[in-house]
Image: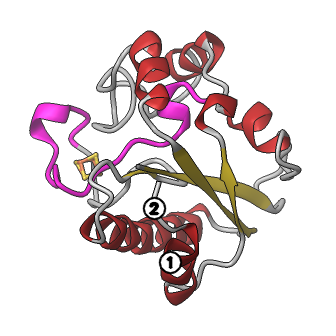
Amino acid sequence: MGDKKELELQFKKHGYDDYKWIAPEHIVVSQWVRMKCMFGCSSFNNNASCPPNVPSVEECMLFFREYSDVVVFHFKRSFKNPDERHKWTKKVNLGLLELEREVFLSGYQKAFLLFMDTCNLCGSCTGLKSECKNQSSSRPTPEALAVDVFSTVRKYGYQIEVLNKYEQEMNRYAFLLIQ
Ligand code: SF4
């Protein structure tokens, strides 16, 4: 691993100041997360970056083991209107993609971003990986890779709760895998 201080300067330059370095072995990957995608989430089969367009849970576990460092970025907001939320998450995800590219170009060839919300870069998603309209920029969320975000971020003192009203403040997390 190179210089974390240099990477933190890049994070700062992009305006990110709420993040934590976490150990990849502390990322909790669980079969129940995939089950929740398959049963109860409207993105299943409808988003090209979500299951079933992603690796198996076992492959996801192996993938995380290939990294030495992970940064979790925290974002919190509340909205009355779902459309406002989607505009915000698209903007945040696009900003994170710029950071991922910069980290990659500074020598971290394995840099890989997990979006803080389901990929919504296009007006409507094809639902099929082979037909994704933006292959180079689409990324999965941590949840799509079977990460139990609740258990993982709580290990580091971050807040996350099940919400039961749309207007409640959301705590959302993006992961940047680095090596
Ligand atoms: S880039 Fe577009 S088509 Fe591809 S996963 Fe994202 S929203 Fe869907």
Under mark 1, the amino acid is Glu
| Vertical position of residue 64 compared to residue 117: above or below | above
At label 2, which amino acid type do we have? Gly
Q: Is residue 30 above or below residue 46?
A: above
Q: Residue 116 in the image: state x and y as whole percent.
A: 54, 54
The segment highlighted magenta reads 126-147
**Residue 6: image tag:** 1
Marks counted in the figure total 2
| Residue beneath the point at 84% across and 59% down | 168
Residue at position x 48%, y 71% in the image? 87
- The image quadrant that residue 63 belongs to is top left
Residue 113 screen position, x and y as percent: 41, 52
Is residue 86 in the magenta section? Answer: no
Residue 128 part of the magenta segment: yes
User: What residue is pinned by disc 2?
Assistant: 2
Q: Nearer the viewer, residue 23 or 152?
A: 23
**CB atoms of marks 1 and 2 within 8 Å:** yes
